[in-house]
Image (spheres, rainbow, N blue to C red):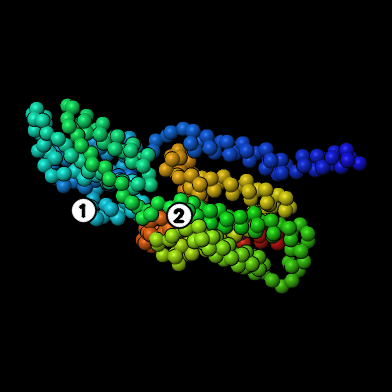
């Protein structure tokens, strides 16, 4: 009896291609993602600000040539206030101030005078590795620009972007978003279960529209999402999380996250024929996307190609917006692009879900 049952279950496991793909494919996918994301260096583009207090021809040439270095993108500023704001908003990694008389001193150095070049760099303390790379590039380039070995002093100052070093503050936004992403397999599995058991077929015999049916599934999931958000944030506060931005704006980011997750779940449920197809596929989609969205690993350390792929997923914008509000206390203007992208993505996903439901389920 045991052997017969064992034989039957083995056949059932291998008969389900989706399950086999999940069991065998997920570890392989993880290995490939880690290798591509962290195994090769690629070219990292560093956005840095420049404040030119000298405004000479020599300083202009210095800045132009610095911008020609591979991996460096120069953004010019008229004053430190604007540069500091962009640094706090995450638009630049660091900014460098070129002092007055830079051109004159460089001319004197070229005429064999023994002068010191003094440059000031301020950078985001949360990205020390990338900042160190930029400082190293500036040091090497400045010595090359001067054509001789000169006394060079770079006054580098980390800016406390996060106000308070708190491990919970860094991980909590990502954990909340990952918890909300579980709505994807939940939505997909719930709707597909009713399709498989014939309940959906009975509903379709009643005078209700496809949109009304999907709303009937989405609203309970939305209520669950509200409970999730309240629970996760409550636990975060208990563990010492502090939100430096607008808490209502943060709540809105989480709400939008829950909605686009429900939208993806609807799309998967329209495609899947059985529950044991919908849920594994949801997880196969969800886990790699979560890994590539900066939930657990900073995107700054990933390969540029991987970062470009990550920007295709709404989870990346959810993480960026939530973390900016919690860590940096960013205002709406700093995260408005992420908010607009989340809104548009949510609308598109729901429209696609309704279309596929009508085409594949209602028929």
Res. 356 image quadrant: bottom right
Depth check: 113 or 19 in front? 113
Depth check: 156 or 348 in front? 156
- At horizontal 31% and vertical 53% (from top left) the residue drawn is 86
Spot occupied by residue 55 in the image (x, y as percentages of width and height): 14, 45
Spot occupied by residue 323 in the image (x, y as percentages of width and height): 44, 55
- At horizontal 59% and vertical 65% (from top left) the residue drawn is 227
Kindly identify which numbered label has been placed on residue 35: none
Res. 230 image quadrant: bottom right
Q: What residue is pinned by disc 1? A: 79
Which quarter of the image is occupied by the C terminus? Answer: bottom right
- Secondary structure under tag 1 reads loop
Kindly report the distance in space between the C-alpha atoms of the residues bearing marks 1 and 2.
31 Å
Q: Earlier in the sequence, mark 1 or mark 2?
A: 1
- At horizontal 51% and vertical 61% (from top left) the residue drawn is 238
Closer to the observer: label 1 or label 2? 2
- Secondary structure under tag 2 reads helix
User: Relative to 23, is 241 on the left or the right?
Assistant: left
Spot occupied by residue 12 in the image (x, y as percentages of width and height): 80, 43
Q: What residue is pinned by disc 2? A: 169
User: Mark 1 touching mark 2, by CB under 8 A?
Assistant: no
User: Relative to 144, is 182 on the left or the right?
Assistant: right
Which quarter of the image is occupied by the N terminus? Answer: top right
- At horizontal 80% and vertical 39% (from top left) the residue drawn is 10
Answer whether residue 229 is visible to the viewer in this image: no
Up-down: is 150 above or below 253?
above
- Category of crowding for the residue at label 2, using alpha-carbon neighbours closer than 10 angstroms: few (below 14), some (14–19), many (at least 20): many
- Category of crowding for the residue at label 1, using alpha-carbon neighbours closer than 10 angstroms: few (below 14), some (14–19), many (at least 20): few
Spot occupied by residue 178 in the image (x, y as percentages of width and height): 55, 53
């Amino acid at each position: 009896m045991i052997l017969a049952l064992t034989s039957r279950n083995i056949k059932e496991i291998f008969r389900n291609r989706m399950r086999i793909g999940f069991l065998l494919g997920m570890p392989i996918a993880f290995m490939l993602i880690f290798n591509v994301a962290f195994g090769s260096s690629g070219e990292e583009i560093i956005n840095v600000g420049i404040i030119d207090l000298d405004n000479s021809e020599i300083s202009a040439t210095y800045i132009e040539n610095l911008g020609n270095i591979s991996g460096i993108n120069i953004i010019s500023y008229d004053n430190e206030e604007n540069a500091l704001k962009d640094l706090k908003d995450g638009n630049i990694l660091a900014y460098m101030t070129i002092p007055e008389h830079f051109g004159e001193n460089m001319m004197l150095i070229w005429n064999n005078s023994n002068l010191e070049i003094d440059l000031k760099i301020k950078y985001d303390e949360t990205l020390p590795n990338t900042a160190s790379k930029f400082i190293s590039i500036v040091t090497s380039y400045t010595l090359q620009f001067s054509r001789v070995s000169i006394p060079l002093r770079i006054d580098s100052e980390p800016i406390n972007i996060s106000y308070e070093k708190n491990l919970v503050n860094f991980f909590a936004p990502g954990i909340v978003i990952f918890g909300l992403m579980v709505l994807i397999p939940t939505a997909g599995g719930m709707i597909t279960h009713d399709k498989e058991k014939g309940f959906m077929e009975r509903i379709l015999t009643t005078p209700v529209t496809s949109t009304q049916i999907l709303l009937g599934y989405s609203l309970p999931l939305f209520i669950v999402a509200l409970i999730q958000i309240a629970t996760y944030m409550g636990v975060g506060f208990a563990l010492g999380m502090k939100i430096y931005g607008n808490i209502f704006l943060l709540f809105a980011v989480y709400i939008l996250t829950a909605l686009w997750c429900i939208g993806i779940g609807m799309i998967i449920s329209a495609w899947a024929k059985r529950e044991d197809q919908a849920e594994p596929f949801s997880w196969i989609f969800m886990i790699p996307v979560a890994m590539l969205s900066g939930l657990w690993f900073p995107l700054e350390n990933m390969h540029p190609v991987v970062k470009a792929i990550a920007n295709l997923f709404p989870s990346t914008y959810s993480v960026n917006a939530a973390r900016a509000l919690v860590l940096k206390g960013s205002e709406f203007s700093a995260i408005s692009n992420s908010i607009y992208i989340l809104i548009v993505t949510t609308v598109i996903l729901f429209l696609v879900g309704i279309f596929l439901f009508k085409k594949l389920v209602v028929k």
